[in-house]
Image: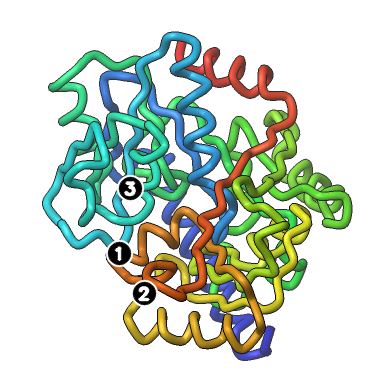
Amino acid sequence: MTAALWPLARLWSAAARARATLYTGGFLRRYRLKRPVVSVGNLSVGGTGKTPFVIWLWRQLCARGLRASVLTRGYRRQDTRDPLVFRSPQGAERAGDEVQLLLQAGVQPVGVATRREMAGVALEAEQELDVHLLDDGFQHLSLLRDLDIVLLDCTRPPWEHDVLPAGRLREPFSALSRAGIIVLTRAYAWTQHEEMERIVRQHNRDALLVRSATEVTGVDPAQGPYFAFAGIGNPKAFFDDLGRAHAEVLDHLAFPDHHRYSAADLARIEKKARQAGARALVTTEKDRVNLGDGSLGMGDGALPLIVAGLNLLVEEEERIVQRVMEALK
């Protein structure tokens, strides 16, 4: 962190605290949907594994007979109408990559709107629901919620634990006091998860604190060696997951989160993969959405494209679900 960024970060922190106080103190209007709302969000910009967790939680609730929706803003969507409602991937091509990922995973209904309460009202007018899952909702304070679940990535280095622009945090750690469940994602043995737990408990002694990890699926080491590429919030975490799956990765390319691939990008990937001597390409499900109709991995002589799945391993699953169920009463 440069000295010039420190005072800017203090201003950001003060503004974030003031904004939260205006909402929680009743000075700014907040909306209440008819059905309970459970928010899944994070403190930081960039990937914490939020979408896989939303999919996991939706499946857990549905397995217990609950009718759950997901409310999301549809980041970087091309169709800007509000609200949008989807029950299948068909027609969702312009709604953003995360919306498409949710629908392809079987999650439905999904309501999309800049003001998530508009999506919730539209869904409640169309069908009976038991709960809304508010995607990336921790800072969306205009919508009242019954429970906040916050995800923290344990692979991020300590110097990123400051607010913007000095670090990656949208809010200071003190905002964790609003959370009922805190999930430490990618809490591998080599990470500083114990230090993260200490920080969490400084600001919230009552929240349920659990760990989770991820593993890639659908990647056969025998098909390698691979060239990997990803345009997600934390590409390094994906590349590390490939290593834990014993996939040999000769080289890789990282793109910005939600990156939409151009023909030039695809040509660059193919060129670097061949220069590295790779036998196949590997990327994420999110990147496959953003490839569009690109020809990567297609045609005679093209390197095959493997799309890796992601399996979420959550400790104390039943305690999480129990705490969510209690919030719905």
Amino acid type, callout 2: Tyr
Q: Circle 3: is it few (<14), some (14-19), or many (20+) Cα within 10 Å?
A: many
Crowding at label 1, few (<14), some or many (≥20) Cα neighbours within 10 Å?
few
Q: Secondary structure at mark 2?
A: loop
Of the numbered discs 2 and 3, the one sitting upstream in the chain is 3
Please give the residue where the numbered disc 2 appears in the rendered image: 261
Given the image, on which type of amino acid does mark 1 rest? Gly
Residue 12 against residue 181 in the figure, above or below: below
Q: Position of residue 79 (x, y in %)?
A: 15, 57
The residue singled out by tag 3 in the image is 100
Quarter of the view holding residue 27? top left
Contact between labelled residues 2 and 1, with CB atoms less than 8 Å apart: yes
- What whole-number distance in Å separates the C-alpha atoms at marks 1 and 2? 8 Å
At 41% across and 59% down in the image, what residue appears?
A: 288
- The answer to which of 117 and 27 lies nearer the viewer is 117
Q: How many marks?
A: 3
Residue 221 falls in image quadrant: bottom right
Q: Position of residue 113 (x, y in %)?
A: 22, 46
Question: Position of 41 compared to 264: left or right?
Answer: right
* Cα–Cα gap, marks 2 and 3: 16 Å
Residue under label 1, please give it. 292
Q: Earlier in the sequence, mark 1 or mark 2?
A: 2
First along the sequence among labels 3 and 1: 3
Q: Residue at x 11, y 52 (%)?
A: 81
